[in-house]
Image: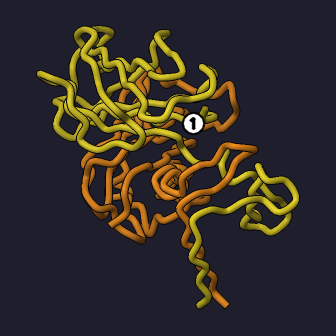
Amino acid sequence: MSEIITDKLTGKTSAGDVTITSEGGSATMQLQQGVAKAWINLNGTGTPAANDSFNVASITDTGVGYYEVTFTSNMSNTSTAVSGMRSANTDNGYFTRCDVQSGRTTSMVELSSALYTTSLSDGTDVMGIIHGDLA
Amino acid sequence: MAGKIIADTIETGAGADISTSYVVNGSAKAWVNFTQISTQTVRDSFNISSITDVSSGRTFPISYTSNMSDGNYVGSLYQNAVTGTGYINFDNQYVGGFGSKTTSSFGERSYGSSGDIDSNAVELIIQGDLA
């Protein structure tokens, strides 16, 4: 096994383009574009708190079933791709959802959660994943 | 020869760089595309060792090859609740169930307007921390 220990990787041909080869070997992609820039699993009951997260600085309770999630490192624009779920782990229901609200800036995204009804409610296992470009 | 790179930063452009923590923390730790029609079958996956057909629309456990560090990971689920696979084929006013998360597995439940139903398209992405 070989091992390279370094603090920084820079593209040789283009400094800003570190490419990786596909599993099939016939394509390449930009490494930075394929990784999620933030994710969070939060408990929205009471004072919202992260069960676990990455690149999340804080959570603000903006109403029943609403959570404003602020990033540690901001995104470069608001055209992010966000997906969400609410687990049935500890909630008494299977058919759950977590929508992305319109409140979205380079520094935060607002998530909402509900069970199978249309009424929003706080969940203990609300999840969001954010892809896009960092600032 | 197997290779290994240990780095703190990957440069994304002039004056901009990205911490390798984004590569580690931002990479999906597992994903799977499977059908529940007839014999439940994985079409393609990463870090998934097996799936088990519980009953109509229900798959549990969906087991990892390499376990997660705890149950606080994140998932994104799509299930279409019909037998087709086209972009017009869905009956998913319900997102579906994703839960029973442990370090080694989780469960998925497909549900449509008629109740529990086998979906031809079940797609899951897992983000979080590996053990």
Q: Residue at x 59, y 26 (%)?
A: A80
Question: Quick check: can you spot residue B45?
Answer: yes
Quadrant of the rendered structure where residue B121 is?
A: top right
Badge 1: few (under 14), some or many (20 or more) residues near its Cα, within 10 Å? some
Question: Quick check: can you spot residue B39?
Answer: no
Q: Which residue in the rendered view is the most extreme toward the front? A: B15
* Figure chain in yellow: A
Quadrant of the rendered structure where residue A40 is?
A: top left
Chain name for mark 1: A
* Figure chain in orange: B
Please give the residue where the numbered disc 1 appears in the rendered image: A131
Task: Provide the secondary structure element on which disc 1 rests.
Answer: strand
What's the residue type where badge 1 is placed? Answer: His
User: How many labels sit on residues?
Assistant: 1
Give whichever of A127, B2 is nearer the camera.
B2
Q: Residue at x 67, y 62 (%)?
A: A9
Residue A18 x, y percent position in the rendering: 74, 57
Residue B43 x, y percent position in the rendering: 61, 58
Q: Residue at x 24, y 16 (%)?
A: A61
Give whichever of B6, B57 is nearer the camera.
B6
